[in-house]
Amino acid sequence: MRHMITRRSFLTLGAATVGSGLIGATNAFAMEPRYRLAVTGWDVAHPSWPASAAPLRIGVMTDIHAVEPWMSAHRIGDIAARLAAMKPDMIVLLGDYVNALRPRFVSRPVPVREWVAALGELSAPLGVHAVLGNHDWISGEASAIRRAFEKAGIDVLENRAVRLSHRNTPFWLAGVADQMVSPTNGIRDIEAALDAVTGDDPLILLTHEPDIFRVTPKRVALTLAGHTHGGQVYIPFVGRPGLPAQYSGKNADLAYGHIKQGGRHMVVSSGLGLSGLPVRFLVPPEIVMVTLRGLGTFGFNLPLTSEA
């Protein structure tokens, strides 16, 4: 028997569909970018980290894109305080601190001095370390950011490395300069960053763009990156249509999450801010806690995500 849909049923279905669309749009353009904050945990077990050593907990903030009304200095300070309250052993900032939205979506860019002051909420035993991103250079603010960071006690790692120690376990932390502003120098940047690294101590690499993972030496145990924003939009059964073209096809695996390749590990965060359009859908702003531990020690295999 054929069941004919009545006009009333059709209008009810249409209204429900439109209503769902409006709710989704409101969430994507108003709620998710401005008010949500996810805390994502990743667990990385690597043979270079001694099994007998205490795990290293690394707090990650990236792609802040300070701009009102979406990412004000007040909101940045609140997020920084939440990350510090999680008591990481070390905090890293992975670039793109300045506005990247189209002008019509911006009420006021947040000056460097204001958002750097907001990051003063960050505190960790092994310090706060940073690299710069492509928008920091494109904006012409890179030098001002570097000076402000240095004044605030934030260590800027551009093609250099520092040796740190966590509960008597020494390790190296290196950072590379942004790859998009000088794409032909990518491999040489790695060489410069690792030039001072000696011995067999574990090595962690900070970079803004994840593309460099393909050419990082096996010596690097863990790479931490941002830049992609996770596409800002995730559509179930479709994917991440907002990703830059270079993260499609064979590079789609670099877009987000915990990537493993040839014994090396990389964690890519979807970051906090916005680029292009002020929209996030099922890709909320996030802060990340990465736990680096030795093989055979207790941990978890899946990402742990919660709302802060």
Image (cartoon, helix red, strand yellow):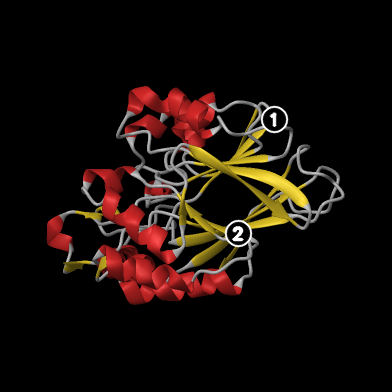
Of residues 120 and 230, the one nearer the viewer is 120
Q: Position of residue 80 (x, y in %)?
A: 47, 70
Q: CA distance from mark 2 to mark 1?
A: 23 Å
Q: Residue tagged by mark 1?
A: 263
- Say few, some or many: other residues with alpha carbon within 10 Å of mark 1 (under 14 / 14 to 19 / 20 or more): few
Q: Tell me if residue 114 comes above or below residue 144 in the rendering.
A: below
Q: Position of residue 205 (x, y in %)?
A: 56, 40
Q: Is residue 293 visible?
A: yes
Q: Position of residue 170 (x, y in %)?
A: 73, 47
Q: Residue at x 36, y 41 (%)?
A: 243
Of residues 31 and 143, the one nearer the viewer is 143
Q: Residue at x 13, y 57 (%)?
A: 103
Q: Residue at x 83, y 53 (%)?
A: 298
Q: Position of residue 152 (x, y in %)?
A: 42, 65
Q: Earlier in the sequence, mark 2 or mark 1?
A: 2
Q: Is residue 19 visible?
A: no
Q: Residue tagged by mark 2?
A: 90
Of residues 67 and 178, the one nearer the viewer is 178
Quarter of the figure with residue 217: top right
